Image (cartoon, grey):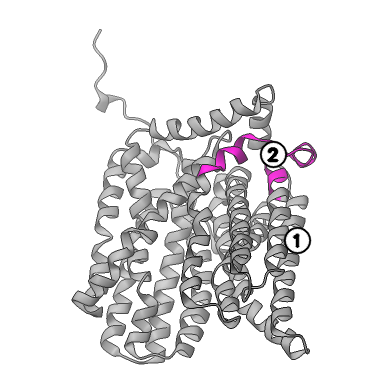
């Protein structure tokens, strides 16, 4: 008996969900699970600058030389290597806390308590006389913060149903940015206020960091009010009889082998690396471009950081709406094209010259479209990580890969700008999106996105 012709038995198409209205799209942001993710996003964004840009301001004001300050870029290493210890977070149980709150919530509370302790330790250091101890404190803050990120990402993926993933990510991105704003501009204003109240500068900085340690409790309270994801409960029950070593080994090996066992796994990994490359390539040179064009530092702070933050927040929620309304493939196309074409706004600005309104428009377009692309892209990453036995490990690996474009592939952007000039550089920034678009076409034709299921995020 011969097999029937494929054309005579076409595979049924997945059902198309009805398009969401604006009211429905906004209502999803008020769901308790999404609100939990929002507050956890704030807790994740808060510590980043405390071991980064804010700390560098404190060190410079304390008289630390620029060479030493430059070495502190290495403090961010835990954020790029967090996938190494992610299997421990996936597999091990925290004594007492995991029994009281569950696997994910136990790790959430643990990472936040460690983060509070690390920030307090950093607050007690003296950059002027003991930069080594400052480095140790900052490294501990970064490690605790990266661990919190691992758990929050896994918690978000496992706790939100498909139709809330994009909304959850949009809320997470918005709250993350607000947390960063508080730990940068907020800390600087707070230190000035403490100095105005009569405290010495070193003491004012100490209390500024102590205040930030207290704000981590927002995330701790959120973790206590949340409920353990059902996927995590099932995974914990399935592995309860195994030893710790067996669970860690299963999480580490299983996460990588399962992913590499996918059809077109290498193409998927390349797509993860390249999707945000167009954003990263141009974004690396945004600050020198603005200053080189003739804008002042105040223009940069007010427009690039202030207006840019507002555009990012609006773009994040717009991305959540688009990803909820359209299929994953369509949403990825929208995000990919928008974030590539947004670089044309900077090419236009390069021809306009010093004009604050033009700068505000260009920054708004770039940040708005970049946020749309980010939310949709992370919704895609979430769809790739659906095994609760090693959600944290796979997601940490994917986010580390997605940072390759920003960290390494964009390293030569300055040489390109120097050789071509600013207008041509930003035109090239549009062109570097081509590989990701080719991969998007390839994966779409190979039914990669269909294989993820009817993901209508």
**Picture residue at 61% right of the left edge, 80% below the top:** 62
| In the rendered image, the vertical position of residue 302 relative to residue 240, given as above or below | below
- Camera-side residue: 323 or 365? 365
Q: Which mark is residue 217?
A: 1
Q: Position of residue 137 (x, y in %)?
A: 64, 62
| Magenta-tinted stretch | 84-108
Marks 1 and 2, the one that precedes in the sequence? 2
Residue 399, placed above or below residue 1: below
Q: Is residue 20 left or right of residue 288?
A: right
Q: Position of residue 236 (x, y in %)?
A: 67, 31
Q: CA distance from mark 1 to mark 2?
A: 19 Å
Q: Taking 101 as reference, is 321 left or right? A: left
Which residue is the site of mark 2? 103
Q: 15 or 81, which lies in front?
A: 81
Q: Element at badge 1?
A: helix
From this viewpoint, is residue 196 visible? yes
| Residue ranking furthest to the left | 420
The vertical placement of 404 against 352, above or below, is above
């Amino acid at each position: 008996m011969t097999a029937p012709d494929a054309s005579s038995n076409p595979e049924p198409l997945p059902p198309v969900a009805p398009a969401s209205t604006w009211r429905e799209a906004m209502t999803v942001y008020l769901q308790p699970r999404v609100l939990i993710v929002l507050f956890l996003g704030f807790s994740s964004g808060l510590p980043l600058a405390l071991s980064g840009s804010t700390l560098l301001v404190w060190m410079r004001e304390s008289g630390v030389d620029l060479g030493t300050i430059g070495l502190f870029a290495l403090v961010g290493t835990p954020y790029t290597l967090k996938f190494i210890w992610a299997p421990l977070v996936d597999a091990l149980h925290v004594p007492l806390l995991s029994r009281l709150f569950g696997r994910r919530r136990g790790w959430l509370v643990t990472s936040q308590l460690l983060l509070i302790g690390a920030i307090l330790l950093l607050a007690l250091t003296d950059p002027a006389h003991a930069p080594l101890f400052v480095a140790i404190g900052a490294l501990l803050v970064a490690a605790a913060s990266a661990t919190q990120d691992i758990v929050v990402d896994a918690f978000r993926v496992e706790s939100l149903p498909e139709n809330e993933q994009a909304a959850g990510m949009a809320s997470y991105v918005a709250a993350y940015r607000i947390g960063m704003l508080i730990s940068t501009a907020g800390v600087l204003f707070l230190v000035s206020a403490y100095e105005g109240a009569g405290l010495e500068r070193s003491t004012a900085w100490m209390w500024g960091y102590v205040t930030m340690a207290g704000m981590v409790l927002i995330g701790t309270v959120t973790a206590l009010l949340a409920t353990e994801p059902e996927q995590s409960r099932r995974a914990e029950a399935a592995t309860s009889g195994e030893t710790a070593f067996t669970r860690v080994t299963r999480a580490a090996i299983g996460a990588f082998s399962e992913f590499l066992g996918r059809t077109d796994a290498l193409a998927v990994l390349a797509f993860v690396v390249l999707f945000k490359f167009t954003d990263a390539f141009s974004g690396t040179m945004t600050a020198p471009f603005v200053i080189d064009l003739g804008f002042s530092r105040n223009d940069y702070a007010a427009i690039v950081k202030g207006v840019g933050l507002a555009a990012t927040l609006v773009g994040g929620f717009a991305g959540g709406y688009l990803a909820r309304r359209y299929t994953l493939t369509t949403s990825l196309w929208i995000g990919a094209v928008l974030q590539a074409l947004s670089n044309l706004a900077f090419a236009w600005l390069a021809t306009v010259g010093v004009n604050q309104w033009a700068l505000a428009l260009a920054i708004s377009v770039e940040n708005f479209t970049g946020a749309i692309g980010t939310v949709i892209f992370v919704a895609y990453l979430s769809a790739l990580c659906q095994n609760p036995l090693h959600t944290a490990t796979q997601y940490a690996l994917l986010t580390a890969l997605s940072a390759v474009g920003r960290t390494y592939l964009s390293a030569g952007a300055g040489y390109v700008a120097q050789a071509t000039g600013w207008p041509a550089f930003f035109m090239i920034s549009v062109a570097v999106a081509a590989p990701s678009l080719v991969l998007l076409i390839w994966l779409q034709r190979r039914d990669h996105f269909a294989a993820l299921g009817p993901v209508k995020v």
